[in-house]
Amino acid sequence: MIELVSQGVSVKSACQVVGLSRSTFYREPTDWRARDAAVIAAIQLMLKKSPKAGFWKIVKRLKLKGYPFNHKRIYRVYCRLGLNLPRRTKRTLPKRPLVPLSVESKVNHQWALDFMHDTLYCGKRFRVLNIIDESTRECLAIEVDTSLPAQRLVRVMEQLKTERGLPNQVRVDNGPELVSSTFADWCEEHGIEVVYIQKGKPQQNGFAERFNGSFRYEFLDAYLFESLSQVREMAWLWRLDYNDERPHESLGHLPPSVYRQKLENSSLEVSY
């Protein structure tokens, strides 16, 4: 359009060629962001409070707050910002404080939880949940299945509650099952403090990682499994051997179950 006018064609003829009205040609260009800055700020304020809110929710919120914009103007700005398109909000984890990896010589003081992955001989993937008592290095549970959601984790903890009691603390990473409200609410209900490690710092859950290394080398990488039932049965036998027969260097070359009995006996002597 501007090129035609610059080449000597009249504005009227140039507008007829491109199908544009002359009033539009003479209109001064405006920045819609500057013109609708108040609407943009209001919409962004609503989205900051409720990132998943849709158009009509935003309109109702703005009306309740007393903003004078009508829904047509809000929708025009809403679309120009691209908010009518599917949007994803990044889930951010709260900042995790650095907690020293200290151990108290007290049974059931702190447990460590972690997940592992492997595959059956047919290629089907499965997951493994390992629960360790940090003070005795005893493996309390090895749960195996194709899926282990937060509800399953709570069920395993309920079983351990009946068999062994519950710890004062649990040390976990930031996996979806472990940061879920289901697990967090259950721990709060039972007075268990959840100690989250910092993101990308698996060494802060060193006892679980050390156990995972042994479990991977001695069990998962040592056999080919044909079914989940076979994995569960063999893992149960391996756990019995690990707890009752296998000497542990950090425990003075004692098996975890023997070391646990030693701690319990010493605590009884002190109490007397």
Image (cartoon, helix red, strand yellow):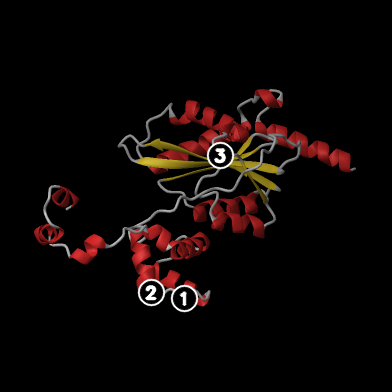
- The mark that comes first in sequence, 3 or 2, is 2
Mark 3 to mark 1 CA distance (whole Å)? 44 Å
Count neighbours of disc 1 (C-alpha within 10 A) and say few if under 14, some if 14 to 19, many if 20 or more.
Answer: few
Label 1 sits on a secondary structure element that is loop
Q: Which residue is mark 2?
A: 71
Which disc is residue 199 wearing? 3
Q: Which residue sits at x=64%, y=53%?
A: 161
Q: Position of residue 150 (x, y in %)?
A: 51, 53
Name the mark nearer the viewer: 3 or 2.
2
Q: Is residue 80 left or right of residue 102?
A: left
Q: Which residue sits at x=82%, y=39%?
A: 267
Q: Position of residue 187 (x, y in %)?
A: 63, 55
Question: From what the image shows, is residue 72 above or below residue 145?
Answer: below
Label 3 sits on a secondary structure element that is loop
Name the mark nearer the viewer: 3 or 1.
1
Q: Which amino acid does the dot numbered 2 rest on?
A: His
